[in-house]
Amino acid sequence: MRILELGGVRVELHYVGRNHSDNSLVILIPKDKILFTVDFIPIQTVQFRDLPDGYLPDWFDSLDRVLELDWDRMIPGHPYAGGRLGTKDDVRALRQYMTDLSDAVRQAANQGKCFDTAIKEIKLPKYETWGNYEQYLPGNIERFCEYWGRGY
């Protein structure tokens, strides 16, 4: 953690591990319990395309580290879900989405269904109301197929 003082306000920079990239930081303003994140924690939205430059399973660890910080409201880099601020429940929901996706793709990979068959067959109805579900779920499946089917 690094601490900056800006106009009398304490600002903390936290490296929470690899996720969307290997150099993502989150910014915490402890006084207001506000956390700013970029790209790797969308609110009620499926992850972008095939999680480009994403590090699995480090992403899960990164989400856990974010949950350990003391904050109440989160400003995401891409505010979906009506533009509202995020909560820890939103981070938990994203982690659950990624867990559900990972489990479904691992099962498909074990059955030799990655890539095309998995992309056609895997549906996560619990998340159908999330932003970009139809558009980006196939790419999310593809990324997890790369991980579970090929090890990267």
Image: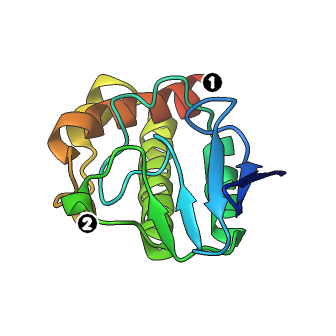
In front of the other: 122 or 58: 58
> Residue extending furthest front?
7
Q: Is residue 57 visible?
A: no
In front of the other: 63 or 120: 63
Estimate the spatial distance between the alpha carbons at disc 1 and disc 2, rounded to whole Å: 27 Å
Going 63% across and 49% down the picture, which residue do you hit? 26
Disc 2: which residue:
126
In front of the other: 126 or 40: 40
Disc 1: which residue:
152
* Quadrant for the C terminus in the image: top right
Q: Amino acid at mark 2?
A: Lys
Q: How many discs appear?
A: 2
- Asked whether the residues under the numbered discs 1 and 2 touch, taking CB atoms below 8 Å apart as contact, a structural biologist would say no
SS label for mark 1: loop
Q: Residues within 10 Å of mark 2 (few under 14, many from 20)?
A: few
Residue 87 screen position, x and y as percent? 45, 72
Residue 132's place in the image compared with 96, above or below, is above
